[in-house]
């Protein structure tokens, strides 16, 4: 039995802009995990704790994401000269509570998880970029409208600066060209680790409101204009620079700018709960904002002294915002 796991993710900056090719986003891995166990077996058996039943490879709507991932990776394995054998795969870790998703990128996480599980089963190791391409190819073939930033962060399992690629172009290649040739070509993305040179507390607050990302993204995408894109890219670059220089004032300033850009894009991004989550950091040595598509789910905060952290946590608790995760950043080599 082989075990693998994948993390969740949350955006710090660059949401919505990252949907356009060549844009930047800063995304943080969250160590709330999905886990898979896989082994060769006499027949195919796939089970996820999202559902109360298991399937084989016969198409099933509930399991379509997992089944399509398996199909694509098996194509890749055949191209690598592997002889396919049936297996049993069990997936656990829902990234939700009481049926409400956290918004940590669970669909991206499950795709990367299945890719990693199959590669481990066949004892094949590949680099981070190829893992990202395989996972992205699954979602592109499904017509997914996301930026693939989730996947970039989940494959790297770190704080990453992601530069997006032209998804329409790559989706067309996947339709028309040889699969292996597409995987070997330059897609035009980059995924690089960011190492903050300052100690701070990173906090994740969950509003307990579920956001329907795909619907919101479609609606808000229409508001994206060149000015927003230019400002967002400059803000993400300045935020990364401030983190790498360890400048708390500039970090707060750039996160605040990123937040204002989102507010300017659409009033729907900040629900009343997310607004309260953000405003709870006022008059503290801290900054908070919504994360990801908005309209619910989680917000994040960076706090630069212990007192600010404690006050912020108490304010969130009073507002009914649940502290989902807390991490000390920048205090060792691993950050």
Image (cartoon, rainbow, N blue to C red):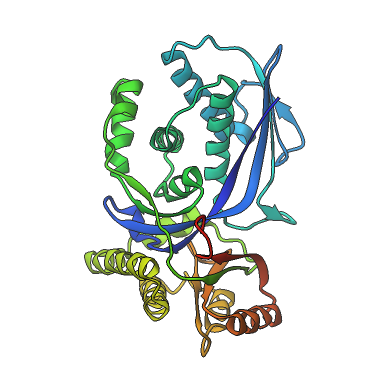
Which residue is nearer to you in this view: 118 or 167?
Answer: 118
Q: Quadrant of the N terminus?
A: top right
Q: Which residue is rendered at x = 28% and y = 44% of the image?
A: 166
Above or below 112: residue 206:
below
Residue 144 position in % (x across, y down):
44, 43
Which residue is nearer to you in this view: 273 or 196?
Answer: 196
Q: Which residue is rendered at x = 31% and y = 20% of the image?
A: 178
Residue 296 visible in this rendered orientation of the protein: no
Residue lying at the far right of the rendered structure: 52
Above or below 134: residue 238:
below
Q: Would you say 227 lies left or right of 334 here?
A: left
Residue 290 visible in this rendered orientation of the protein: yes
Q: Would you say 242 lies left or right of 70 here?
A: left
Residue 179 lies in quadrant: top left
Which residue is nearer to you in this view: 80 or 243?
Answer: 243
Residue 321 position in % (x across, y down):
66, 73
Which residue is nearer to you in this view: 160 or 46?
Answer: 160
Residue lying at the far front of the rendered structure: 333
Residue 273 position in % (x across, y down):
59, 76
Q: Would you say 81 lies left or right of 51 here?
A: left
């Amino acid at each position: 039995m082989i075990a693998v796991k994948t993390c969740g993710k949350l955006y710090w900056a660059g949401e919505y802009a990252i949907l356009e090719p060549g844009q930047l986003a800063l995304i943080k891995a969250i160590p709330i995990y999905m886990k898979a166990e896989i082994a060769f077996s006499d027949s195919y058996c796939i089970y996820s704790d999202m559902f109360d039943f298991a399937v084989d490879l016969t198409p099933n709507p509930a399991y379509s994401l997992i089944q399509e991932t398996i199909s694509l990776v098996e194509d890749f394995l055949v191209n690598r000269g592997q002889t396919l054998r049936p297996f049993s795969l069990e997936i656990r870790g829902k990234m939700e509570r009481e049926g409400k998703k956290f918004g940590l990128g669970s669909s991206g996480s499950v795709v990367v998880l299945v890719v990693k599980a199959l590669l481990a089963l066949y004892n094949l190791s590949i680099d981070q970029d190829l893992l990202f391409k395989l996972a992205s190819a699954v979602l592109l073939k499904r017509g997914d409208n996301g930026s693939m930033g989730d996947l970039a962060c989940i494959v790297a399992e770190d704080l990453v600066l992601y530069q997006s690629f032209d998804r329409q172009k790559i989706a067309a290649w996947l339709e028309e060209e040889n699969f292996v040739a597409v995987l070997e070509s330059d897609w035009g993305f980059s995924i690089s680790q960011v190492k903050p040179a300052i100690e701070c507390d990173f906090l994740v607050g969950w509003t307990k409101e579920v956001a329907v990302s795909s619907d919101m993204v479609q609606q808000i995408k229409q508001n994206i204009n060149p000015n927003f894109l230019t400002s967002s890219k400059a803000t993400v670059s300045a935020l990364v620079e401030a983190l790498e220089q360890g400048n708390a004032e500039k970090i707060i300033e750039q996160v605040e700018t990123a937040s204002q850009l989102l507010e300017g894009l659409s009033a729907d991004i900040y629900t009343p709960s997310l607004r309260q989550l953000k405003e709870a950091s006022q008059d503290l040595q801290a900054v908070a904002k919504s994360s990801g598509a908005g309209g619910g789910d989680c917000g994040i905060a960076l706090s630069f002294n212990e007192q600010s952290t404690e006050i912020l946590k108490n304010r969130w608790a009073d507002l009914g915002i649940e502290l989902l995760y807390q991490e000390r950043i920048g205090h060792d080599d691993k950050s």
